[in-house]
Amino acid sequence: MQKRTLLILALAALSLPTFAGMQATGWAWINDDGDAATATSVAEQDTTPIELVTERVIRLRVRFDNMRDAAKSTTGLKYFTELPASNIDGANAALIDLGPDAFFDWASSAFVSDGTTIESRDIIFNSLVLTDFQATFVNGIFVSSAQPFSVPAYSSSEIEYCIKPTSSNAGGIFYFLPGSSDVEIYPQASNLETFPTLTFSVPTTMKTAKSSDVSVATNEGSIKLSSLSNGTVKVAIVNALGQTVKFASEETADGQLTIATNSLAQGLYIVQINGVTSKKVIIK
């Protein structure tokens, strides 16, 4: 009798979902050129990454389907720089909060106020898991700051996030996910959920000279760059694991820039200049 009870409990456990969150099942990049209903789309929904070449305001509309029997929170928006090899939720340690010292920060829209209630823009439900779909729609909000929003049980909703690249952003590919462990994306062959993707490219007017022209020298406690183009130069120092460990964004009237490295461990680093020129250096 005891063995039979244990078998029944085991089978029941296998039949339950292995995750407790709701799904981010669709998204679209939106221009900041109108209100929540009239603003134009940057590209096709859910499948097309976008590229920015200026530090302009951009909006991201995300569809959420909550197929659980309790309300789930979306909280804010986060990003990461390496595409994960497996499923991810908003509690993943690789996710980075938006902020003035990060690559992206919250931005005020010229057309929509923070916290404004918004209706659906018919964001495409993009999942092969049909049970994720929830037909009952609940109005969402427009957010220009980190704030929670709860999607009721067995409902869908849409949140529109308003963000912009910061002066610390030296360029690259970025993937986004609403924060909180309640929200998940499953980018696998078994379904079609994908991460909102954005490429930020440094404007042509900010690009440095050719790689062969730029000189990088390491001194005790600093790195000195020479033969840079005049104007604003953004420098990212990347360690051997591909992690950006230091930023600098300064004007270079004489084509030179010195960056302190006292806080960095010894080892090999890549110096990325405006996301275009890369130089290897060894900090001793």
Image: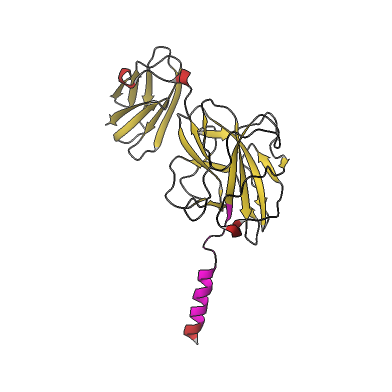
The answer to whether residue 211 is left or right of residue 114 is left
* Whether residue 117 can be seen here: yes
**Rendering colour mode:** secondary structure
> Residue at coordinates 33% horizontally, 25% vertically from top-left?
222
Q: Is residue 163 above or below residue 26?
A: above
> Residue at coordinates 48% horizontally, 38% vertically from top-left?
174
Q: Is residue 158 above or below residue 109?
A: below
> Residue 255's x, y, as percent?
38, 14
> Residue at coordinates 64% horizontally, 47% vertically from top-left?
148
In reply to whether residue 140 is colored magenta, the answer given is no
> Residue 140's x, y, as percent?
69, 45
Q: Which of the image's four quarters has the C terminus?
A: top left
> Residue 190's x, y, as percent?
49, 56
Q: What residue span does the magenta drawing correspond to?
A: 5-23
The number of discs equals 0
> Residue at coordinates 52% horizontally, 78% vertically from top-left?
8
Pick the front one: 198 or 19:
198
Q: Is residue 138 above or below residue 106?
A: below
> Residue 245's x, y, as percent?
40, 35
Question: Please, which residue is most extreme toward the top here?
Answer: 254
* Whether residue 261 can be seen here: no
The answer to whether residue 211 is left or right of residue 127 is left
Pick the front one: 34 or 74:
34
Question: Please, which residue is most extreme toward the bottom here?
Answer: 1
